[in-house]
Image: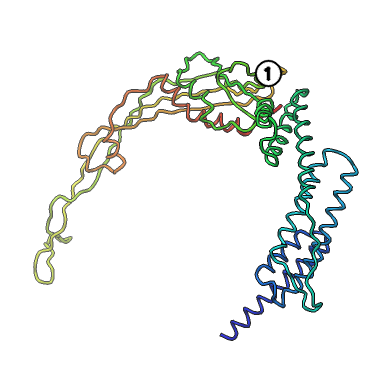
Amino acid sequence: MVKKQLLLALIITISSCSSIKKTQEAINFGNYDQAIQIAVKELRENKTKKGNQDYVVMLEEAFEKATAKDIENITFLKKDGNPSNLEIIYNKYLNLKNRQELIKPLLPLPIHNKGKNAKFSFSDYTNDILATKTKLSDYLYGNAKNLLKVSSNKEDFRSAFDDLNYLDKINPNFKDVRNLIEEAHFKGTNFVYVSLQNKSDKVIPIRLEEDLLNFDTYKLNDLWTVYHNYKQPKTIYDFEIEINFREINISPEQIKEKQVVKEKQVVDGWKYLIDKNGTTVKDSLGKAIKVDKYKTIVCKVDEITQFKSVQVVGQIKYIDLITNQLVKSFPLASEFIFDHRYATYSGDKNALEQEYLNLLTYKFVPFPSNEQMIYDTSEDLKNKIKSIVSQNKIYH
């Protein structure tokens, strides 16, 4: 028990020393907020503990240096006068305020060997935060509105979208920001028209075309890309994805037969055991010994295989509708096989293995129509189309 307590004390001491070292290293490298986080965490557990005195001293030092660093940066950025710095200035004021709020619940923090409390110079940054937020809001709003008005670049619209969402977060319901967010999103979105072209000599089932063009089931729409299989009014499409069928090859209906003969030895009564001299063998009690008598049973199996296949060959084309240029193309192919096996027999079916017994339970079935065969490729085609499109998204 004593050994366990000593071991626990040793572990706690090592852990404490390691934490103190990390705090001091953070200060030495200028990572003041990291040092503050570590010190606050330790002091929350027991701020009066003698072993935690180092954290009090380091917290005082880290806070003073972090505050001075932020004030210095704010002063420089204000003198620079670039309005794009307003977001940085705003966040630094928030850091100054939040840093103080992190420490306040711990106060007072005594430094025992100096007989006084640690000193933290707190300031009220409320007015600075509000004033900077107002300037930042006006800047973000004006800049975004200007981009929406004069730009034709989707990246600008997406940048405006991000700025407006940030503005709505720090200053909810500011002017008509919500409407501008919708406008920026619409203007920054790539609209993709999806079409299907059948250049084979086979008729494609309508339901196959509907399935392949129903991009809602592909779940490929994202923040900046929307797919339509019908052109919407007042929508300018940026790209077209053309699913192009060039060949649809359907094999003839085939029936193949194979006959198999199976033999098996089965017990058929009994007989007396006879030795090589033709004498009946007896046991130790003088009774004649009986043994199983076998016979061979035979079964003929006609195994029938029905076979039909379809192969769809084509490509997926990416067309830039703004420049009317082919951007990319990818091969597309799918195959569906109808393969049905069944069997009939003559003779004793007890001679058959389970595989053939299973086949006996099946019967001839009508061959699927060409239309059904083509439609049965749809699931595989959809998976391949989804894979190609999800891995090859294009943007303006």
Q: Quadrant of the N terminus?
A: bottom right
Q: For mark 1, give the secondary structure.
A: loop
Which residue in the rendered view is the most extreme toward the top? 201
Q: Residue at x 23, y 38 (%)?
A: 299
Which residue in the rendered view is the most extreme toward the right? 79
Residue, disc 1: 321
Q: Position of residue 271 (x, y in %)?
A: 12, 56
Residue 96 in which image quadrant: bottom right
Which residue in the rendered view is the most extreme toward the bottom? 2
Q: Position of residue 392 (x, y in %)?
A: 64, 31
Q: Residue at x 72, y 29 (%)?
A: 157
Q: Position of residue 306 (x, y in %)?
A: 36, 27
Lateral position of residue 225 relative to residue 215, left or right: right
In depth, the one of 371 and 118 nearer the eye is 118
Q: Residue at x 47, y 17 (%)?
A: 204
Q: Residue at x 65, y 31 (%)?
A: 178
**Mark 1 surroundings: few (<14), some (14-19) or many (≥20) residues within 10 A:** some
Residue type (three-letter) at the residue carrying disc 1: Leu
Q: Is residue 9 above or below residue 153?
A: below
In depth, the one of 340 and 35 nearer the eye is 35
In depth, the one of 52 and 120 nearer the eye is 120
Lateral position of residue 73 relative to residue 327, left or right: right
Q: Quadrant of the C terminus?
A: top right
Q: How is the image coloured?
A: rainbow
Q: Position of residue 328 (x, y in %)?
A: 67, 25
